[in-house]
Every structure is written in structure tokens, then in C-alpha cells.
Amino acid sequence: MPRPSRYSPAEKEAIVTAARDRMRRGESCKDIAQRLGVNQPSLRGWLRESTLDMLYPPLPPCMPRNRSV
């Protein structure tokens, strides 16, 4: 069972947004992680996840068809 996240989804989004802004200015991921107080692997994972969500939006949940009809 995965342990609960240390950051809420809103906090993660704020960190990712701030990190993207700093990356546009040319800062390294290592420096950004230190400034924001986040582990570098976590920050890289969150950035990758948000990029994939932008490129391939998650599908909405769908109900299975009623096959008995």
C-alpha cells in the first residue's frame, strides 16, 4: 500500500507551476528543487506527470455497458 502523499494536489500544482516558471528562466532542476524545498526526484516525477497529462489528457471514467439488454 503506497504511503500518503506529503503534499496536497493543490500544493503539488503550485510547486510544478513555480518550477516551470523557473525552468523557463534557465534555472537547473537541482536548484529549483532546493529553493522550493522538494526532493529532486519527486519534482522531476511531478513535472513528467504534468507534461504527460498535457499531451495525453486522462480519459474520463466511463461506466461499462449493460450487456443484458
Image: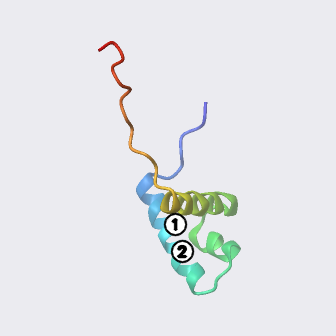
- Vertical arrangement, residue 30 with respect to residue 43, above or below: below
Quick one: 65 or 46, which is closer to the camera?
Answer: 65
Residue that appears at 55% across and 73% down? 19
Helix or strand or loop: what does disc 2 sit on? helix
| Residue 44 - label | none
Closest to the observer, 56 or 68: 68
Q: Is residue 32 above or below residue 51?
A: below
Work out which residue is located at the far top of the displayed protein and give it: 68
The quadrant the C terminus occupies is top left
Q: Are marks 1 and 2 in contact (CB under 8 Å)?
A: yes
Q: Position of residue 37 (x, y in %)?
A: 60, 66
Query: Toward the viewer: 14 or 69?
Result: 69
Horizontally, residue 38 falls left or right of residue 17, namely: right
- Read off the residue under disc 2: 20
Q: Quadrant of the N terminus?
A: top right
- Image x and y of residue 39, in percent: 66, 60
**Residue 14 spot, x, y in % from top left:** 45, 66
Q: Residue 16 bears which disc, if any?
A: 1
Q: Nearer the viewer, residue 16 or 68?
A: 68
| Residue found farthest to the left | 69
Mark 1 crowd level (few <14, some 14–19, many ≥20, 10 Å Cα): some
Instruction: Please count the marks in the image.
Output: 2
Could you give the CA–CA distance between mark 1 and mark 2, rounded to whole angstroms? 6 Å
Q: Residue at x 51, y 79 (%)?
A: 21
* Whole-percent x, y for residue 65 in the image: 35, 25
Residue 24 picture quarter: bottom right
For the point 63% across and 69% down, which residue is it?
33
Give the residue type that dot 1 points to: Val
For residue 29, side relative to residue 22 (left or right): right
Badge 2 amino acid = Arg
